[in-house]
Amino acid sequence: MDYQVADSQRLPAELLLAMLHTATQIALPATPIEMQRLQLSAPQLLSEPDQEIIVNLTPQADGSITAIVGQSTNQPWLQATIQTNAASAEQRVALEPILARCSNQATLSQQSNGVSYGPAYAGLERIVWNDSEALGYYTLDPFQPKQLGKTAFTPAHGAIMLRLASEFHQRHGLASEFRKLGSVQIVADCPAEGLVYLKRAGNSNHLAILDHSGRVYAKFQGLSTHSEATPVQALPAPSTSQAPSDAEQILERFFYAPRWQPTLANAQSTPQVGKLVIIASAESQALVSALCANQTAAINLIWLDSTLKHPTIPTWLVRSNDPNALSHALAAIGSIDSIYLLSGLEQASTTFDLGHFEQQQERGVLSLFRLLKALQEQQLLDQELSLKIITANTNHVVANDQVQPFAASMFGLAKSAAREYRRLRIACIDLEQHDLAPETVAATAAFIHGEAPLAPLQEVAQRQGQRYQRILEPVKLAPSNLAFRKGGVYMVLGGAGNVGFKLCCYLAEQCQAKVVITGRRAITPAIEAQLQSIEERGGRAIYIAADMSDLDSMRSAVATTKQHFGGLHGVFHSAMSFEYTPLNGLTEAQLYQDLAPKARGSVVLHHALVDEALDFKLYFSSGEAFTGNIGWGSYAAGCTFEDAFAHAERAQVNYPVQVINWGFWESERDQYLDALKAKGINPIETAIGMQAVSRVVAAGIPQVMALNVADKVLELMGVVLPKPNVASATPAISQAATPIPAAATPPVAPVAVPLVTSQPVAANPQNQREQLYGYILGQLAAVLKIDPSRIDVTSELTNYGVDSLVVTDIHKRFEQDLGSMPVTLLLENTTVAAIANFLQQDYADRVAAFFSPMVAATVTSQATSNTHEQLIDTADLFALEVGSNQPSSATQPPTAPASITLLRQIEPAAIASELDRYGDQYAQKLFPAWKQNGGSLVNLTELDANPQLLKHLLVNVADKTQAEVWMIGNGPPLVLIPAIGLTAPVWINQIQQWAADYRVIVIHQQGYGMTDLTSDISTAAVAKLFISTLDQLGINRPCHVIGSCFGGVAAQYLTQAYPERVCSLTLCGTFNKNFGLPDIDVSELTIDQMIEGAKMIGSSINRDFDAVAEGLASDQAQPIVEQARSLLLKSQCVSPLVVMRYITQILTLNGQAWLPRIQAPTLCLSGNLDTIVAPETSRTISQQIPAGRYIEIPGAGHYPFLTHVDLFEQAVRPFLREQEAQLMSTLV
């Protein structure tokens, strides 16, 4: 046998399959068959060399055959049902689209996960894959196809199919002990050399054996494990007599170390053509000459700080410290296809000279930043553009690397740029000095030309001619009490920040440490309170104001520390500048400021400490160094510099230098905490983080990433998860817990793969729609981990847990198969049916190409030569019955009440507390039960009774659509419309104080609170909802309307579309297009940018409250601003995905034409400190409305009705009284 596990010979499941197939061919010669409902066991141990195996075939009354393979019929190893079929039409799969979609690749060996493959089974040589499919290349021993007689489906063919499935699962963190197989079809003799294709569909896999032309020979459908929905734990907890604590379980899978591993070349498919610009300085002259040699591209050279010129190539000489020089050169060059930016290629240096550092920043990260700005100015980022960044010895790749770190900040900035500018493809290529030698430079140039930039960014290195890529691998770090000295002296740079202060407290508690906190600012009362807190925990603490960018200042801080405490034992660098700013809005001054703590600050700190005898120096970096998300480009740049510098510094000092790349830490004010947790991103709790610090210091590990996230998030960051530790061989089919008789085994229905019929499917739109339904349901089911049959194609996706975080995954899956999609795909098409309709109407060509028609003539077993073949895409390869798309009773929305439902009436004394609790009740998911079971029907007479009570209502405004309403008072109707994503509690002051004079009404628009979400959430639809609700409430007279921010946009539309229904209009901090900002082309946005935009709204809210707090006296700021902030954030009772849908409405909105049509008297209000919508926007709107006026509230921000209640009332109340009196006089 050629199949061994732990030196034992085993009988693999694939051999049992081949034996069964051979037996059926003998029993049913020339009869096409299909093996269904297969239940297979684990590989069986061979107790005897000549052990007898029985294949039992039993005909059944329905024409099927029950098959058992094993030692006896009572001890089955394999059970199946055999069905006879008509001959299948020959199929050929289009291979090129598969290869285009699969960007990952790996070469396999004869050893995999404990399985040793002998010569006859080591057939799978190479695989390529993506998130949902894989393609493997195999070559079998020439003897193998003859092994079992006439049939050419051998155990080796089964083995390569199972091995591909196992390799795919292991790369996606899924279990790989396969248990069930829906069906097996062998349609022709399988070749000895060919391909095996895998399609992930829902919770199972479909596989096919192909030849190199794409012809199909065999299919496995519905291959699944015992627990497909549960990913394998990357690092299982150790086996002990006691269950580990929660903290220990987290720390077991908390650490990931970077490593560079050899990889195959990622060859560029086409030679360099078009116009190539090379930007370099004099030390790169030899490499530049080699890059220019034998090139068909039109080359332009830009030399930084050099007088070099090329005799035949257009050359531009610029000074690296001139911020406009690159822009001028690129403007003169014109159109560009590719750019090479060479930096940091000078000979190795160990001095870390600050002057040299500043020069290299100019030639490196600042030149990259200026290049990006220049490309943006020239509109070159609107087209496909390739950028290759070439450095030397900037990364620590192999053991003897002498790291030159000064160019490393370019990597972090490039990663963020690659995500922000979706048409910019970037490759970061790190060479070594040996590559620049005369004898190797030509080969180096060929390597650079051949490296293909991949989205979002390709980061590679070359050492001694070998290509490397960085991966992250899980590591375990043992607990230790030896990391810190008792009473030790530790300096914490940035110790007054969130993580730094937690560390200081931990050191005080654990080892009664003497802590020195440094920071740029002078000491404040808040810092004094922190020092006192540290001392209360058993430590001692002082604060030293020191500028990290100034060497004399830092040397003085070190000297003061030693003088005060008698020594210095360890240093933590936790200083940072952390501000969200997309590159599009980042200035050079801000970039330099953001870089300073981690770039220049690290170099200065090295010189200040170079002669100290430390126990350790620990840099606090971030996982952003590996991801580079949109908005954090300058922070990521600082982190990549810091990481590289620590590697370089380690060789120059006599103490350990370490780096922790932290994940997301817990904080008191994170409004996205629940959403991040749902996505698998868990905040680092203080206790866990401090234990991590202790373990890292004690272990002495040079660099480690520390974070608490799900396996899927790790894979996106480049973590290579360990393969599962299984007792039996893998790939294999594991023994079921309780064997099920074949006749009783239900079929394992493949899901999410479109239907292949015997007729051309693309010619029939209905068939194509069914294909689309199957495909869309499969993608949703795979991401949401639910049975696709649960999804009603007409129900809102938010009902199934689709939010702003998972929508990114779903969107990218569609783009992977169908090409670039508009960012609004899942925001404007919110049901399966709507998505299918959109794709059929707007992307008909792509859909037709993806669901390529297959013509399969009806044939019999006697006429197989008449089968018709046609090239098909993989969507048509595997057959299934698409389930009924009729809504099930479980997913039908409840029938709306006939009129008005009164949920509750709230006494005046309880109004404030009930409104404050509203957000908590939303978070506790109480609303669905209220809608289903709560309240009682009331008529208008009953509704008008007890006007002093706050009434909480559900109003039927359309078939099966309800609007949530809060109403109090019996005076003139006053409609309050909150800002985007906010609900009634933000109007808490007006609800309580104005009810004596007005009937105060808050109507929640579509998707807010308990108001049903509808497919149309346009401004017109929102206005119609309001009018319909008012009609149902019996309010037909003109209303006073107040709208805040986006609520003011709806108010503007309502006023100009229904002028007879509006008495007066008050607009607070509103706009009429795109938040008053410059125009944004939604079609150019990526889904990642849309997600970041949604996050910016939350950040802007906090910035606005902070601005207001700074303007108030200190004794006023805390109670007023913090209470208002808390109330507002709690009132966000709207799905983030719904908010994103409204954002797309805002980004495409232009209400300029409404303004002259608004005839109602209009008051435009703005706080002079508003940081969300500039006051000038409100002033401009007031000037364009015929009866407009403007008032600015001093000291207020975006929400004056929350923070400056009295001033808001003084501005609005007289205006309302004036307009009400005018209306009454008109009526008289």
Image (cartoon, rainbow, N blue to C red):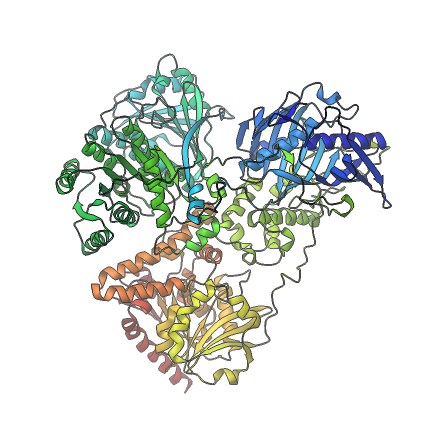
Query: At which x and y percent is residue 1074?
Result: 40, 55
Q: Residue furthest top?
A: 439
Residue 842 visible to an observer of this rendering: no
- Say if 854 sits above or below 1062 in the image: above
Query: At which x and y percent is residue 414?
Result: 37, 36
Of the 4 image quadrants, the one containing the C terminus is bottom left
Of the 4 image quadrants, the one containing the N terminus is top right
The quarter holding residue 54 reads top right
What residue is drawn where x is 12% and y is 40%?
Answer: 563
- Say if 92 sits above or below 1156 in the image: above
Q: Residue furthest front?
A: 241
Query: At which x and y percent is residue 305?
Result: 25, 26
Q: Nearer the viewer, residue 799 or 929?
A: 929
The quarter holding residue 629 reads top left
Q: From the viewer's perspective, tell me whether residue 67 is left or right of residue 539.
A: right
- Say if 47 sits above or below 312 in the image: below
- Say if 132 sits above or below 1021 in the image: above
Q: From the viewer's perspective, tell me whether residue 46 is left or right of residue 310.
A: right
Residue 1054 visible to an observer of this rendering: yes
Q: How many marks?
A: 0
Query: At which x and y percent is residue 863?
Result: 85, 32
Q: Nearer the viewer, residue 316 or 271?
A: 271
Q: Nearer the viewer, residue 1160 or 825?
A: 825
Q: Residue furthest bottom?
A: 1228
